[in-house]
Image (cartoon, rainbow, N blue to C red):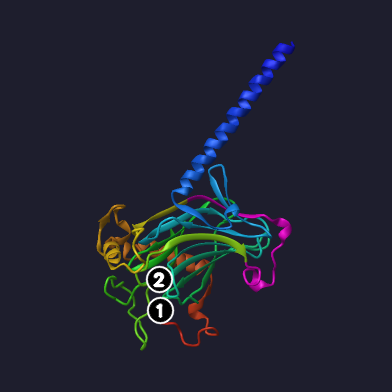
Amino acid sequence: MAASWNGGLGVVASLAVAAAALLVVVAAAAASKFDEVVQPSWANDHMVYDGDLLKLRLDSASGGGFVSKNKFLYGKASADLKLVPGDSAGVVTAFYLSSAGDKHNEFDFEFLGNVTGEPYLVQTNLYIDGVGNREQRIDLWFDPTADFHTYAVLWNPSQVVFLVDDTPIRVYENRNGTKGHHRHRGNGNTTAAGPPPFPSPQPMAVYSSIWNADDWATQGGRVKTDWSHAPFEATFREVRVEGCAWAANASDWDAGEVRRCSESSWGKEGRYWWKEKEMEELTVHQSHQLVWARAHHLVYDYCVDTDRFPVQPPECAGR
């Protein structure tokens, strides 16, 4: 009987070793999937793998973040993301694109945590040549903590489009017709000071981060982060970057790279689908989706905030 028992222990031990080895393989595969695209940008120990998922973690010591390994000029960046569940008041998770320098461009998703039972708000913003203050906020038509949803930014010479599960929630159009950009069909409204600005062609990296912003994020800062619920974790299933990859040895002002990414239809990445004619504006169906999202879920728009902007920003003319 003792021999049989010992043999059983051996089988159990072998199975345990095999299971542990399998977990290592799965974790390595997950790490490989993400490591091809992103790397930690700060607080490396707060970017952790859990099976085939990547988590950014916030505790009382630190938040964390990642950045794409490559920059790109025009394309689409997306993340399959599940937000911090439960009481996430004061916690902000961001997914955004940004170039470098004082005159940088930046396209932001910021997910503003809330107390249990209250909806997340999604704030989008654009910085153009270093100037931001273009915030819009929506509430979502689903619980972003219950499952993964896809948040994406499409960027080409004609427009910047923010999408949630392929539904456009915001479009920023190019109406200035500058060299190297397409003139986007719109209402044509400009101000006496000139056409509205559009991001100049600067290569961007893709970023995400989680941090404590309880001085402003939830109900204007009235609700603070409850650290008894820490750690707070935002979970990624996948991060994708499809775009014209900027040459690693090129400066951010390399004219040859700007021409290649702005004027070419094909490259080492394949077909530049994000610059094709049908990507210059929304389809009829997408336009209807945008109208629906803004009619039912827009809760703040800087364009109509006359306290902040007594003179309407030029890109808001006609709205």
Mark 1 secondary-structure assignment: helix
Rendered-image quadrant of the C terminus: bottom left
Query: How many numbered marks does the figure carry?
Result: 2
For disc 2, the neighbor class at 10 Å (few under 14, some 14 to 19, many from 20) is some
What's the distance in space between the residues labelled 2 and 1, CA to CA? 8 Å
- Residue 172's tag is 2
In this rendered view, identify the residue nearer to me: 285 or 249. Answer: 249
Mark 2 secondary-structure assignment: strand
- Identified at 66% across, 68% down, the residue is 214
For disc 1, the neighbor class at 10 Å (few under 14, some 14 to 19, many from 20) is many
Q: In the rendered structure, which segment of residues is drawn in magenta?
A: 213-238
In this rendered view, identify the residue nearer to me: 92 or 300. Answer: 92
**Location of residue 194 (image quadrant):** bottom left
Compared to residue 32, the image places residue 227 above or below, namely below
- Identified at 71% across, 12% down, the residue is 3
For residue 261, side relative to residue 169 (left or right): left
Q: Amino acid at mark 1?
A: Glu
- Residue 139's tag is none
Compared to residue 194, the image places residue 113 above or below, namely above
Rendered-image quadrant of the N terminus: top right
Does the magenta run of residues contain 204?
no
Q: Amino acid at mark 2?
A: Tyr
Q: Earlier in the sequence, mark 2 or mark 1?
A: 2
The residue that mark 1 highlights is: 315
In this rendered view, identify the residue nearer to me: 170 or 229. Answer: 229
Q: Position of residue 263 (x, y in %)?
A: 25, 64
**Circles 2 and 1: CB distance less than 8 Å?**
yes
